[in-house]
Image: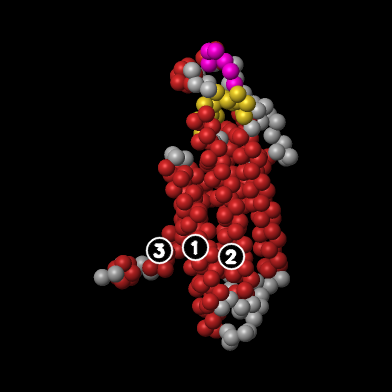
Amino acid sequence: MTVGSFLEQLGIRPYTVYRIFKYSIYALLSYNVVLFFQDDHLAAAEIFGDAVTWRNVVEAYSATIDTLAWVILLLLFELETAVIPDYKLTGYRKWLPVSIRTLCYFFIIYAFYGYWVKYGLVTDLTAFSVTNVCSLVGFGFTYVAGLDEYLPLDATACAAMQGQPLFQIAGTQIIGTAAALDAAIKLAIVDVVNAGDWLLVVVLLEVEVYLQLRNLLTDRLLVIMKVLKGMLYLVLFGAAVYWGLKGDFLDFWDAFLWLVAFIFIEMNIFEWHEETRETLPEGAIATR
């Protein structure tokens, strides 16, 4: 007995279970916006203090802004590829999502810039010389525990750092060992690669949607798109694994959820393509 037939015997439609699972993933991704805001807020307090303005907010809250924009974009893709019928997307129903999506792309690219700035921040280091590290306790110094993790220097931490070469992030009171800063720099690089990779994925998705709307997405083109995106998804999977191995659970969990979420979008596009091919003659345009 298959899982589907078992659920049907219980009076539960398999498609209903699928939709509940899909929207649960979307809900978890939405909640991650709150979690990233908490992390960004703590890190921003150490790096920028009270100097966070609209000019540097993307540097301070790059992960929050990036995740929020992606969640909105994900929901728009869901509406366009699976929820709203083509014939209903006319007038403001057509242009409003386009306007919102354009705004999302602005913030996503802006957040990508923020990741580059953050990488520049953790690589802008100066040698920090002090005879007794514990003499700094109580004077506002923090130490690098990880990327965006800057903890107050205490007796335990300073004892562990004593005798090691230290570095200071320029313009801050954040210090760290070579090993801690090297780990933070590698995570910053992964952030940049991950964000850039997602931008390439969404460009391919937009091309697919554009071609699909005009009935120009052939089976061959669909396969080519899937291969290209498959390679990009492989890079994203590698980033998720790296975060998992390095103990950054939130980044790992978020990356995993995004991969699952976009599998749903890929399935939506495939089903949409199949439905259009069955209902429209070859060469016709599915206008909205």
**Residue bearing the label numbered 3:** 17
Q: Residue at x 45, y 21 (%)?
A: 160
Residue at the image position 47 percent from the left and 53 percent from the top? 237
Which label belongs to residue 230? 1
Circle on res. 205: 2
Give the residues in magenta. Answer: 128-133
Q: Which label sits in the foreground, 2 or 3?
A: 2
Q: Nearer the viewer, residue 58 or 194?
A: 194
Q: Amino acid at mark 3?
A: Val
For the rendered model, the colour scheme is: secondary structure
Identify which residue is drawn at 50% across, 67% down. Answer: 227
Mark 3 vs 1, N-terminal side: 3
Q: Earlier in the sequence, mark 2 or mark 3?
A: 3
Dots 1 and 2: beta carbons under 8 Å?
no
Q: Are marks 2 and 3 in contact (CB under 8 Å)?
A: no
Farthest residue, direction bottom: 281
* Residue shown at the point (57%, 15%) measured from the top left: 130
Disc 3 element = helix
Quadrant of the rendering where the N terminus is positioned:
bottom left
Q: CA distance from mark 1 to mark 2?
A: 12 Å
- Dot 1 or dot 2: first in sequence order is 2
The question of residue 271 being in magenta is answered with no
Looking at the picture, how far across and down is residue 165, in whole percent?
53, 22
Image depth: mark 1 or mark 2 in front: 1
